[in-house]
Amino acid sequence: MQPKTPEEVEAIRRSGRILNTVRDEVAQAAKPGVSTRELADMTREKLKAHGGEPAFAGYMGFPDVVCISVNDQVVHGVPGSYVLGEGDLVSIDLGVLYQGMITDSAVTVVTGDQRPTGKVRTLLKATEESLYAGIDQVKPGERVGDIGNSVQRRLLRDNLSIVETLVGHGVGHEVHEQPEIPNFGMAGTGSMLKEGMTIAIEPMATLGGKTVHTESDGLTISTSDHSLSAHFEHTVLVTRDGFEILT
Ligand code: MG
Ligand code: MG
């Protein structure tokens, strides 16, 4: 991947700011009684209001503006008639295009007033912390394997399974650019990070096994044992001496 120019970095920063705002507003609206279709419609309107475009619309045949994956769905869930209930685990994964530059980010939230407890709490906490453990490795000269290894160690500390067939990636001009960024690996191996690269780090973990499959819609990816999964993602810029989280 070519490092981004200063002009591109400025545009991707603004793309990330729009994403951050819309993602958090939509995540807050994920409540019992709300359908995933309504969340997608809200996303579309908010993106428009902030001057951003949905980067996922039409990408690889995706028919909507945001991926909403509930419970055993890991990623690429298609918004529809499903009405959220109490205690659903909802992943909102959004891509934003602004002045030609794309950012990509996801959060997972639990619906309803009950705070998550036990294994669900562990799943959410560890997956989010593993994202930051990976981000902490980002620095020119470090390698993709340093990120993956750090993510992996955090997830395994809580005995979670890592979805190994889905990976993070470079991002910017396209939704998916090189290099791939697995959520596991050996420190000191893989592509080297350079100043100006923009990458999406996105751990996906489950309470059961690591095996996933594609549903009959051809898009939604779910855990094969129907165990719950969580997904957190940020787009990160490699800076001269470390990183800047753009989303
Ligand atoms: Mg994403
Ligand atoms: Mg991504």
Image (spheres, rainbow, N blue to C red):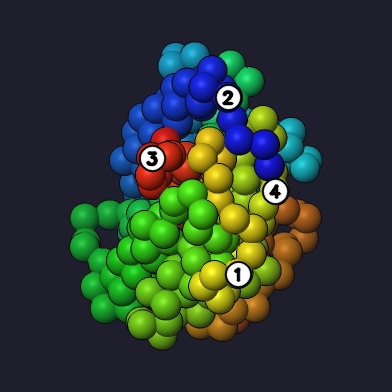
Mark seen at residue 244: 3
Mark 2 near ligand 2 (CB under 8 Å)? no
Q: Position of residue 181 (x, y in %)?
A: 60, 59
At label 1, which amino acid type do we have? Thr
Mark seen at residue 178: 4
Q: CA distance from mark 1 to mark 4?
A: 15 Å
Which sits in the foreground, 101 or 62?
A: 101
Q: CA distance from mark 4 to mark 3?
A: 19 Å
Residue tagged 1: 189
- In primary-sequence order, the first of circles 3 and 2 is 2
The answer to whether the residue labelled 4 contacts the one labelled 3, judged by CB atoms less than 8 Å apart, is no
Mark 3 near ligand 2 (CB under 8 Å)? no
Q: Residue at x 44, y 16 (%)?
A: 50
Mark seen at residue 5: 2
Q: CA distance from mark 2 to mark 4?
A: 17 Å
The answer to whether the residue labelled 1 contacts the one labelled 3, judged by CB atoms less than 8 Å apart, is no
- In primary-sequence order, the first of circles 2 and 4 is 2
